[in-house]
Image (cartoon, rainbow, N blue to C red):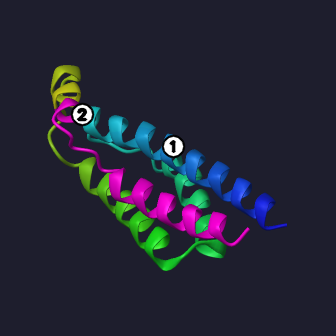
């Protein structure tokens, strides 16, 4: 049972990371957000809220705040976005680290 729970969380976290990364790039390239684009990431956040630890939830909420706060910022070129990625600026890093910690703790309980 716990093994299935871990697998479901891994999929959930992976889906959140994929959707958040897509939205972050969109927010870096465009100033106007179509609010409909945010629906999937908020749905994933709600699913995280149902089953995840507080650190995972807090870091997921911070990712969404970063996305929302990035839209009104000046647009970046593809080169600028690539430069940020190369320099290690990763808005998803804390979320990924929190997820890894939580999943490792759950694995130990098997």
Query: Which percent across, then down, holds residue 46?
Result: 60, 68
Magenta region includes residue 97:
yes
- Kindly state the secondary structure of the residue where label 1 is placed: helix
Which badge, 2 or 1, comes first in the chain's sequence? 1
Q: Which residue is mark 2?
A: 85
56 horizontally vs 107: left or right: left
**Dot in front, 2 or 1:** 2
| Residue that protrudes farthest toward the right in the picture | 1
Label 2 residue SS: helix
Q: Residue at x 39, y 66 (%)?
A: 59
Residue drawn 18% across and 35% down? 84
The outermost residue toward the top is 79
Residue 36 in the figure: left or right of residue 94 = right
Q: Which residues lie in the magenta part? A: 84-110
Would you say the residues marked 2 and 1 are in contact, meaning their CB atoms lie under 8 Å apart?
Answer: no
Q: Main secondary structure of the magenta part?
A: helix
Tell me residue 40's x, y (percent).
58, 50
Q: Which residue is mark 1?
A: 19
Q: Seen in the image, is 11 located left or right of residue 27?
A: right
Which quarter of the image is occupied by the N terminus?
A: bottom right
Q: Quadrant of residue 109?
A: bottom right
């Amino acid at each position: 049972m716990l093994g299935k729970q871990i697998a479901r969380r891994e999929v959930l976290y992976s889906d959140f990371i994929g959707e958040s990364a897509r939205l972050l790039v969109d927010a870096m390239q465009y100033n106007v957000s179509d609010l409909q684009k945010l629906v999937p990431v908020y749905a994933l956040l709600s699913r995280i809220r149902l089953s995840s630890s507080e650190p995972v939830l807090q870091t997921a909420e911070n990712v969404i705040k970063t996305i929302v706060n990035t839209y009104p910022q000046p647009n970046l070129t593809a080169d600028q976005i690539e430069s940020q990625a190369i320099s290690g600026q990763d808005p998803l890093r804390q979320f990924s680290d929190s997820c890894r910690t939580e999943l490792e703790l759950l694995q130990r309980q098997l």
